[in-house]
Amino acid sequence: MNYGFVKVAAAIPSLKVADCDYNEKQIENLIIQAEGRGVEIICFPELCMTGYTCGDLFAQQLLIDNCENALFKLLDFTRSLNIISIVGMPVQMNATLLNAAVVIQGGKILGVVPKTFLPNYKEFYEKRWFTSSLCHADATTHLCAQTVAVSRNIVFHTLQTSFGVELCEDLWAPIPPSSGLALKGAEIIFNLSATNEVISKHQYLCSLIAQQSARCIAGYVYSSCGFGESTQDLVYAGNGMIYENGTLLARSERFCLEEQLVISEIDTERLRTERRVNTTFSESIRMQKTESVVDINCQQTVLQEDAPLTRYVDPHPFVPGGKALDERCDEIFAIQVCGLAKRIVHTSAQTVVVGISGGLDSTLALLVCVKTMDKLNRSRKDIVGVTMPGFGTTGRTYNNAMSLMESLGVTIKEISIKDACVQHFKDIDHDIDVHDVTYENAQARERTQILMDVANQTGGFVIGTGDLSELALGWATYNADHMSNYGVNCSIPKTLVRHLVAWVANTIVDDESRKTLLDIVDTPISPELIPADENGNIKQKTEDLVGPYELHDFFLYNFLRFGFHPAKIYYLALHAFASSEQYDEDIIKKWLTTFCRRFFSQQFKRSCLPDGPKVGSISLSPRGDWRMPSDASAAAWINECAAIK
């Protein structure tokens, strides 16, 4: 199984203007390199067989004939190959000359796609030599002794995907041909281009490709000519870029003097999922005017099972790198604060009550409360922070909870749950030395009861602290930490919570609070419901019990965002975490199985979640993003996990 990945390449060959034999040999060389690396479809630049900058030589019949002879050679060369190649060349048709893309495979021409929008302004004079596809109805022509379809509306079909082709300026039009091709089923668009370089143009071009691939929910492979084109007036940098739904997967080196082959994999399964979910896409299909489309079936391309995945798979999909992380934290924190502010104003709450354990989640919730009160010009004393030491509370978390509340200036309440739990164990006849689920959950429910009652006392409401990762795994006690009046962290994954707290520590709070926050960031994640070890250290570590959160967040993102099979998630995880060497195949399989089992079995907790703000593309709110029956069977997912080898 290739899990929907289609390996594609943007090729930038060396070139000599008007030397078709030389150019054809360079194209052959890159095709054979790509074939050896498992590429299924390779795209070359616009007019790469002749050179884009031939000028009035395009009016010379010798150049046109030499180009067709070179195509004969290329067809013969590819006769034993399954790779699909897309090359640019001038094609004669009805006494006109087309600037066209010729799609070939196995020695045959599959189709010819002519350029639609011919630039004829500033440095461009294409209408001097070429005719637009708009001047021709869909038809056939003879090329290299073959009768081939000629149309701007061709969708090519392989067993793995469907693709379309447009050329350079077509992308810059208000409604690019690729928009129509995508609505007719093309999942990947190939663009043969000859864009010259001027100041700031490249940045705009990248934005254009990213937006078009996102708008079409498609892969977009862009290949533009480079070194070897005439520099009489213009310079061509050799841009090879591969995008997928707005995201850059791979790119060439600009202004390189050597040939280049840019390879990556486009995830067509992911694109299909995005299109199915996006109802605007389906409505656009319905609105599309009925225009004929030429469907051409390609031969099966050879899939190399051992061909490595070359595209980057982010092991931490919720956590961007570099400066983008600070920007994301700033935006998320603002969303949390704005949501809570509205709820406070709407309810005319006198206070907000939050349980403070000294852990990451309750810390983030407290920081949101503090910023919200500041924004509302209210006293921080209207925040009631309640720390509730129990049998497993350690000195480190207790001291951090107290220090943080003191430095932030909130109202502090300390209420031990030990005596109440001891009495409760007597009431239900439970042995206090048996540290089972009853022992743990009784403490969690006692804490929630205290918070709810304090909220009643103070005319406020309880702030939920549970995060998205805990909700996905059901790592919450039903009607305890599972419950609140407003859950500010409900759509923030655990891997991002840590960064948010660190970001607040380094940007917003005073030095004393910063010191405490950074120690909280370094504290092991634990519910602290089991007594500490003999040295007073945390004994019950969450990740030892349910697995590493960075794995579970990776599973969660790919499971919910794209609806991937467990087998594909496993395949992606192996690739994403390969460099860290932290998780071997058995570990990933073990925790993926745990994720699938817990995700299904714990849905009943998510079916009655309190309100809370959505901050990202993944949410488990039963009123919005995730509506699933609590008694759905996990059998198919568990069985697939078991079958992974």
Image (spheres, rainbow, N blue to C red):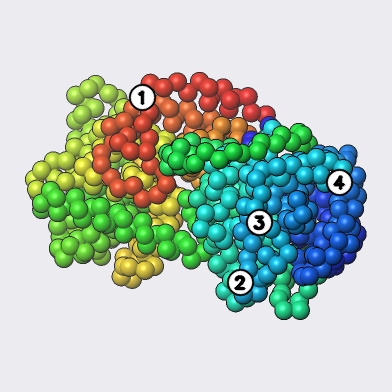
Mark 2 and mark 4 lie on one chain; the one further toward the N terminus is: 2
Which residue is denoted by mark 3 in the rendering?
Answer: 132
Which residue is denoted by mark 4 in the rendering?
Answer: 144
Mark 3 and mark 1 lie on one chain; the one further toward the N terminus is: 3
Task: Specify the amino acid type for callout 4.
Answer: Cys
Rate crowding at label 2 as few (under 14), some (14 to 19) or many (20 or more) other CA atoms within 10 Å. few
Q: In which quarter of the image is residue 258?
A: bottom right
Q: Tell me which residue sits at (16%, 52%) in the image.
A: 344
**Distance (Cα) linking label 4 and label 3:** 22 Å
- Pinpoint residue 30: horizontal percent, then vertical percent: 82, 54
- Pinpoint residue 33: horizontal percent, then vertical percent: 83, 51
| Residue nearest the observer in this picture, 448 or 283 | 283
Please tell me the numbered disc located at residue 121. 2
Mark 4 and mark 3 lie on one chain; the one further toward the N terminus is: 3
Which residue is denoted by mark 1 in the rendering?
Answer: 630
Rate crowding at label 4 as few (under 14), some (14 to 19) or many (20 or more) other CA atoms within 10 Å. some
For mark 2, give the secondary structure.
loop
| Residue nearest the observer in this picture, 359 or 239 | 239
